[in-house]
Amino acid sequence: MTNKFPSTLPREWAILPDALRSLVSDIERHIAHSADAPALAAFPGAGLGNPDEAPYELDGSVAIVPVQGTLTKNGFSFFGFKFSEGMRDIAASLRRAAADHRVKSIMLDVDSPGGTVNGTEELAEAVAEVAAVKPVYAWCDGLMASAAYWISCGAKEIAASATSKVGSIGVILLHRECSGALEKAGVTYNVITAGHFKAAGNDVEPLSEEMRAYLQHSVDGTYDLFLTAVEKGRRVNREKALTMADGKVFSGGEALAIGLIDRVCSRSDFLKHIKKGDSMNPAELKAQYPDAVAQIRAEAVAEHESELASAREEARADGMKEGEERERARMVALAAAAIGEEASATLSELASSGMTPEQLAMAKKVIGSSGSRLSEMREAHSGNRVEQKGLREEASFDTLVKDHMAKTNCGRGEAVRAMAAAHPEAHTAWLESLKG
């Protein structure tokens, strides 16, 4: 046998079957001619690449990240020559673009038949992670199949030209069984294992129904993950996802009709659309991000209601204060009408001095007495000395008030309140003296 299928080739792929067969054929051909350096160099895309080359190009504020060729987790290389794109390299480019202050949006520039299952989910998670920071879009530049579509599902929008091919959503496991060729060549392989399924799917034995079922179960599990990615990315249920993910490949217009992509347009028009999205108007924002808009609105309403409640409480407190002042003015006016302006003024002064209800009850007796008594009460409150028989406490309280006024430069009402608190006995005696 001149061609040997490489034993390190991954088994499960999310790729177009023809692309996988072509890749295997090319790898085997170049391995067979590994001594021929020019043959390796002629392989499309082979070579280590320029390590100083930017991982993405900028078109204005849009970072364009290439997703091209057959995809594998770390890149697929033989003898130092790279045969496929590394999905971890793409993830690193996305994160670098997300951290670039010049970048407002990111576009995946996809032209790929897909690749290995291993690494695809990791890159899809990286797309979702970056999309939470900056908008990520995906453009189909000819082919967006299988793993390449899986990765693009996390984009905000997917677009393609009318002639592009999109889809091939499914999983393939390539099994090569060469027991007949080995038998003809007189070669016998003995497979010795511990564990019934350890050598399931090996290529030197015919594939039994049991082993086929075991491998099919693994493929079905991966397919379920793919369907979940389509459901989440395209916001559809499982039934709808199954109509998209039957392995068929669709043109741009067909892909739009069944919901695989969001628009059919040229690359330049899509870039213009992305740049326009950087300054999205409120209507577009509401249409494309309804959950985020609803959350922002709820927070704004809650904040407004809190401020409104505070304002109402302040207004209520101010209203109560104004009400008290209006009621006091009303009572004074009533007192003036009932007992005269002079008695009303005296009552107002006594109320302002902080009189208690009990003290006010005493004052009521005074208000009910003769006009001369009211005059004496006003004179006592204004600081003029009023002689009372056998009572010196009043004069001493009045002295305290005047001293406090002189010391603090305050009004008499404030001085009366202060001295009443500091000298309650003298204050009580002063009030008793007013009763005569």
Image (cartoon, grey):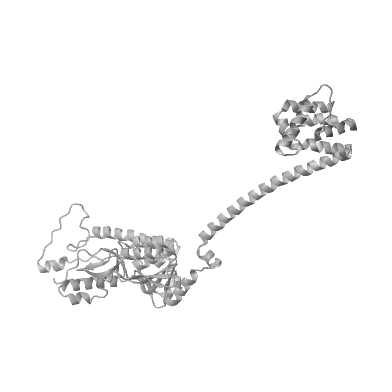
The part of the image, by quadrant, that contains residue 44 is bottom left
Would residue 362 appear left or right of 97 to someone viewing this image?
right
Image quadrant where one finds the N terminus: bottom left
Of residues 435 and 74, the one nearer the viewer is 435
Q: Residue at x 55, y 55 (%)?
A: 299
Residue 424: x percent and y percent? Answer: 72, 27
Q: Residue at x 19, y 73 (%)?
A: 30
Q: Residue at x 13, y 59 (%)?
A: 190
Would residue 358 appear left or right of 61 to someone viewing this image?
right
Would residue 362 appear left or right of 241 to someone viewing this image?
right
The part of the image, by quadrant, that contains residue 406 is top right
* In this view, 372 is above or below 249: above
Residue sitting farthest toward the top: 390
Residue 24: x percent and y percent? Answer: 23, 70
Q: Is residue 62 visible?
A: yes
Q: Is residue 264 visible?
A: no
Q: Residue at x 84, y 42 (%)?
A: 333
Residue 234: x percent and y percent? Answer: 44, 64
* In this view, 204 is above or below 26: above
Of residues 403 and 130, the one nearer the viewer is 403
The part of the image, by quadrant, that contains residue 362 is top right
Of residues 1 and 120, the one nearer the viewer is 120
Would residue 288 appear left or right of 96 to someone viewing this image?
right
Residue 245: x percent and y percent? Answer: 38, 66
